[in-house]
Image (cartoon, grey):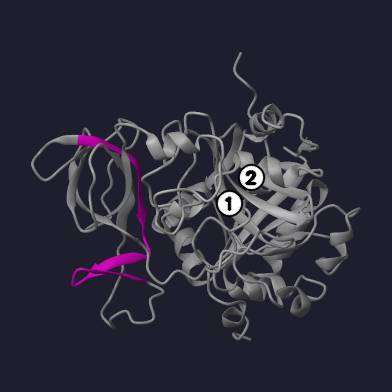
Amino acid sequence: MAAKVKKTPLHEWHLNNGANMADFGGYEMPLWYSSVKEEHLAVLTKAGIFDTSHMAAVLVSGDDALELLQHCFTNDMNRCVGKSRKPLYPGRCAYGAFLDEQGNVLDDTIIFQLKENSYIAVVNAGMGAETNHYLAANSGERNVELMDLTDQVGKMDIQGPMSALVMKKILADPDKVFEKMPYFSFKGHFDSASSLAADVKLIDGTPILLSRTGYTGEFGFEIFIENDHIVKLWEMIVSAGHDYGITPCGLAARDSLRAGAVLPLSHQDIGRWLFINHPWHFALPFELNGNAFTKEFIGDSQLLNGHAPEYTYAFAGNDLRKVSTSDPAEVIDSIGNSIGKVLTCATDIGIGRFKDRIYSISSPDKPEEFNPRGLCCGFVRVKKELKADDIIELKDRRRKIEVRIVDDIRPDRTARMPMSRFLDNN
């Protein structure tokens, strides 16, 4: 018997507001409301909100919590914060993955350090129980407590340059909250019983965990809140964002935005193959020479010594035409050989080429005559090493398109920019 499709607490709101729904990760989620293009552009120019309550999380605590995570997590938590590679500390988070012994990806994750010996690993939809089991199976004699928080925490994202101005209207003490809040930091807690809950509250006193993270490449926040309050929070943000052009967004815009930002989709761009030779080297603890790791972790030897390696690259096309990934589409090199397959092919509608350079609608130096019509972009996995500017063909049953290997796709993304830049627009 097929598993019953789950619903997030915002499901009724989505239906009442015209969302086109589909099954994603075992949840019925909005794909779009009225226009994927408008939702995508809203995040680049104003603000968009996303229901992400389908995401799962595991609480990891105890005297040996750090030791367990160091053993299981690809990033080095003793050297993962900022360019100076400081240790992770309370209020900061880090991106990486959980691997099996063969070096293949179980799931990618962001780990939040709440306080000493207390962490939350946020994983993808449907992966809470599996991640909890994985950590338990590798805990050995370590003093660790694990708690699967699947469907116990409400979550939504607000992304785009107007996000801080919108949040400023609903936070109890926004100036204090926004002070010293760089990219990949967070404050507060969604559990009212936590001592951290007093740090970030809504104007009605409801505690939240507010994180400067997201899945679009643009400035914004992820917000964690008790399930019973997520609908209220969503509606507060919709109301507060009315004058800023806030737009509810579905998974289609989330996919096109993350592709343009060179962010992988777990189980599609990373999965049951070696987690190596890809654009996300920052998720691995490479020594400065790039030939060794700074720590040992599950699957590490396979990554460094794996045979017959494959390579994952980002690409960008010349127009908005796409190929299908359900066939899947194949990758053809410059001499006509089939060398791999297309993992993701989406259209970032906010970018375009002008005199062979990619600009974004948000690029401060874009030419006056620049009018973005969108470019296809995404990731390929191939059997040979390529380099930036190499031209390849993507081929499905309907068409062939020419694309170029790139190091980056959508320029002038805002995610890492200082908070002050987004608070001056009063």
The spot of residue 127 in percent (x, y) is 62, 34
- Would you place residue 260 above or below residue 52 in this image? below
The residue type indicated by label 2 comes to Gln
Q: Which residue is mark 2?
A: 70
Q: Residues under labels 1 and 2: Cα distance?
A: 7 Å
Q: Is residue 226 left or right of residue 400?
A: right
Q: Which residue is mark 1?
A: 76
- Would you place residue 76 above or below residue 372 in this image? above
Q: Secondary structure at mark 2?
A: helix
Res. 298 mark: none
Front residue of 222/286: it is 286
Task: Name the image quarter holding residue 62.
Answer: top right
Q: Is residue 185 left or right of residue 382?
A: right
Q: Secondary structure at mark 1?
A: loop
Q: Circle 2: is it few (<14), some (14-19), or many (20+) Cα within 10 Å? A: some
Task: Name the image quarter holding residue 302.
Answer: top left
The spot of residue 281 in percent (x, y) is 43, 52
Q: Is residue 408 left or right of residue 329?
A: right
- Would you place residue 206 above or below residue 338 in this image? below
From the image, give the main secondary structure of the stretch colored magenta: strand
Residue at point 63%, 21% (across, down):
3
Q: Is residue 350 magenta?
A: yes
Q: Is residue 264 magenta?
A: no
Q: Can residue 25 be seen?
A: yes
Verify CB contact (< 8 Å) between mark 1 and mark 2.
Answer: yes
The residue type indicated by label 1 comes to Asp
Front residue of 98/20: it is 98
Where are the magenta residues, as a range? Answer: 339-360
The spot of residue 31 in percent (x, y) is 51, 45
